[in-house]
Image (tube, coloured by chain):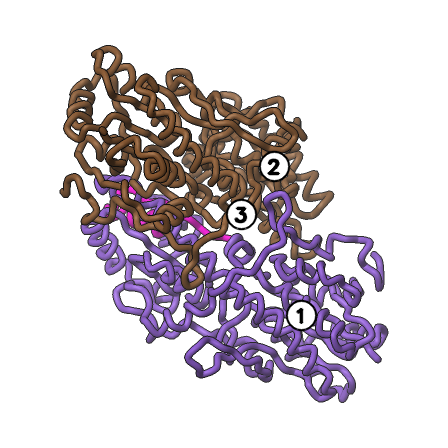
Chain colours: A purple, B brown
Amino acid sequence: MSNCIVAQSGGPSSVINATVAGIVKANQLNPIYDHVYGGLNGIEGILKERIVDLSDMSGRDNRILRQTPSSALGSCRYKMRRSKTGDFEKLFAILEKYDIATLFYIGGNDSMDTVAALTEYAEEHEIEGRRFIGCANAVDNDLMALDHCPGFPSAAKYIATTALQTWLDLNVYPASRKEVFILETMGRDAGWLAAAACLSEKVDILVMPEIPFDKPGFLAKVRKTVQEKSKCYVVVSEGAHYEDGRYIAAGEPMNDLFGHAVLGGAAKAIEQMIIESGAATRCKVQDLSTAQRCHATEISENDQTESHRIGLSAHMRSADPSFTGKMIGVRRRDTDAYNVEYIAVDVSTVANFVRHFPTEWILPDFNGITEEAYEYLRPLIQGNPHFIMKDGLPVYLEPYYLRGDDILVRKD
Amino acid sequence: MSNCIVAQSGGPSSVINATVAGIVKANQLNPIYDHVYGGLNGIEGILKERIVDLSDMSGRDNRILRQTPSSALGSCRYKMRRSKTGDFEKLFAILEKYDIATLFYIGGNDSMDTVAALTEYAEEHEIEGRRFIGCANAVDNDLMALDHCPGFPSAAKYIATTALQTWLDLNVYPASRKEVFILETMGRDAGWLAAAACLSEKVDILVMPEIPFDKPGFLAKVRKTVQEKSKCYVVVSEGAHYEDGRYIAAGEPMNDLFGHAVLGGAAKAIEQMIIESGAATRCKVQDLSTAQRCHATEISENDQTESHRIGLSAHMRSADPSFTGKMIGVRRRDTDAYNVEYIAVDVSTVANFVRHFPTEWILPDFNGITEEAYEYLRPLIQGNPHFIMKDGLPVYLEPYYLRGDDILVRKD
């Protein structure tokens, strides 16, 4: 038998390791490969032969890996440029050296581009016996051809929970204290994460990147909400921008006497425009920042299960020697109760596209999202997995890239 | 029988409602009072007779109230100034009107000052039959005479969990990407919350308000850590300041060409000084902001139980007509296993003092905290209560101050 290798790339999520755990578990249940290797820091580490052996992972470690956020194998932003043939030659040589038949690559758009590039190279050079399989994972939920991306539901759950809790906190002071709360979420191109805050049912104003930002309309809405309700809860996507494409976060030129751009994120910029306009006199900002893609306390059980099963599915399908250049993801079945099937799509149809939040799901005048959008989002955040805890904190697997001794195939 | 009233004041916490639930439950178990009233928005709302009746709260609502973060009765920052006798006259008239024998006031330092002021006034004016009882609750953990303040353990658990998770996220990229992560916590005067991040065992540099900030020493430490480990995890308390008392967050005059103060929090200021000095070229900031005092997903079961029992204890002790001017809190027993007793201390010895993090528990050179500090902190964050959930989100009680219809005693 030959071997396989799994690696992670791009931005991590709270459930990205569940796919690794799924591939390892599948090969223990049905040993298609002699070894399941892990490539450290994605393709960048594989090129340096930084490879660990995951084959004999214990059941307990597999459970713990599933609940550990952030890429346990490390990640990279390294792009396999099609013009840089040296990288490809090196990579295929390494695959040959370690007798690796299948590379599983877990991540989002850029990761799928790497899978596509490797598949193309093998085809062009008529290299046989190497499969390249993508496993979808992206908190931004912006991959095409899928119902949703693993990682997104858990981030959505964290965001909705935090919105509900901070809305309560905002409201504790008397009505005489008029105040605006601004929650900033990730999503440079697509507003899925910002929209997820609406699951709290507490959002007064939603600012999405899919709709050009109408500053006067926004400020009028803030003013009206504060007048009517005393408190105003705003959610803004980091990618919100003006009609001309300028990000809100980049500020407006000539906004201060010296023409400085406003520093900080979209929420800070919005705070400044609210205060300057007098729409309200008091603002609080909560930028969810890194926590939203790793605060695994709010892992959605559906999300964890699906991410794990994508690993199982990818492993099982890879038994077919012709199965290459595919991405495994989920499609929602057309049933009353929420149910998904695991699908394989050509990576070439996925890589380098962005799936936006549907504009027909966005209500006018910053009023949030439609009932259809709620129906899409609600099932995703269901279920709370049981966590293994110690001394009051969740137990996480020590990342492989920090365990020097575990680099079994080659130490460096 | 006469009645009692409970109210909340100051900054909320994730478990501040558990004390309200305790008082209500205690009076159902042992009806010392005809009615348990709730005063909305603390003393400010009581002065306006914004009062609800909590006596008949259902068992289910009591459970849900216990898991609901932020003051369900609303809060205020209103201070009973001893010079403003009109407020006192009005308040005692309201207590008489509603036949209220006992006022339970839940909060931190300022709330205890209100309890002290009311007790003094009653004594000076020889007013009989009115008891004023404080119930300790403060995320900052800065109340004197107690082992710890309810609210702090849950915030500490959220902070330690988030530190662990964001540390994992920081480390996913290859060692060639040198980066500093800066986590900012609350704590304007005391560093308890910042110190709690050390429970993650991932903090490289801890900046506490109890130790004057040594900027050159700090930058040298950042530089060294980044050189040795590639990644550097910094935790800073919002109250960190220089020898002369200037907050780091306030920035340094003449720091830019125009003499502007640096805006934003301590973490942003630290990011700027790291980048300017060249100690590192890449920083990420996570300001935990409001979420740290309301992210009730990380409620510590010990904390919730203790906050609830403070309510039970306060109610039971109030059967004694001479029991007034006291604050109920917890003291740790001198036993091997963690165990507390519920104590009553004179509010006058508590109000307007600040309990700092012991400087002998702070290691030199930003190296975190001593083993003694860990032994203090660890038991506090133990246990995960079962949460009542619906559609993937925790179920919280609709705040009383937003339910117009529930203002039973007087609607306005």
Residue B337 belongs to the span the image colors magenta: no
Q: Secondary structure at mark 1?
A: helix
User: What is the span of residues highlighted in magenta in the rendered image?
Assistant: A270-289
Q: Residue A65 sits in which quadrant?
A: bottom right
Q: In 3D space, how far apart are the residues under numbered discs 1 and 3 (Cα atoms)?
A: 27 Å
* Chain identifier of the residue bearing label 3 in the image: B
In the rendered structure, which amino acid carries the disc numbered 1?
Gly
Question: Pointer 3: what residue?
Answer: B384
* Chain identifier of the residue bearing label 2 in the image: B
Identify the residue shown where x is 49% and y is 60%: A155
Closest to the observer, B92 or A397: B92
Identify the residue shown where x is 59% and y is 34%: B377
In the rendered view, would you say B318 is above or below A255? above
Q: Secondary structure at mark 2?
A: helix
In the rendered structure, which amino acid carries the disc numbered 2?
Arg
Identify the residue shown where x is 49% and y is 53%: A289
Q: Is residue A252 visible?
A: yes
Closest to the observer, A412 or B277: A412
Neighbour class for label 3 at 10 Å: few (<14), some, many (≥20)?
some
Left or right: A363 in relation to A402 = left
Closest to the observer, B359 or B47: B47
* Chain identifier of the residue bearing label 1 in the image: A
Disc ID at residue A22: 1
Q: Quadrant of the N terminus of chain A?
A: bottom right
Question: Pointer 2: what residue?
Answer: B378
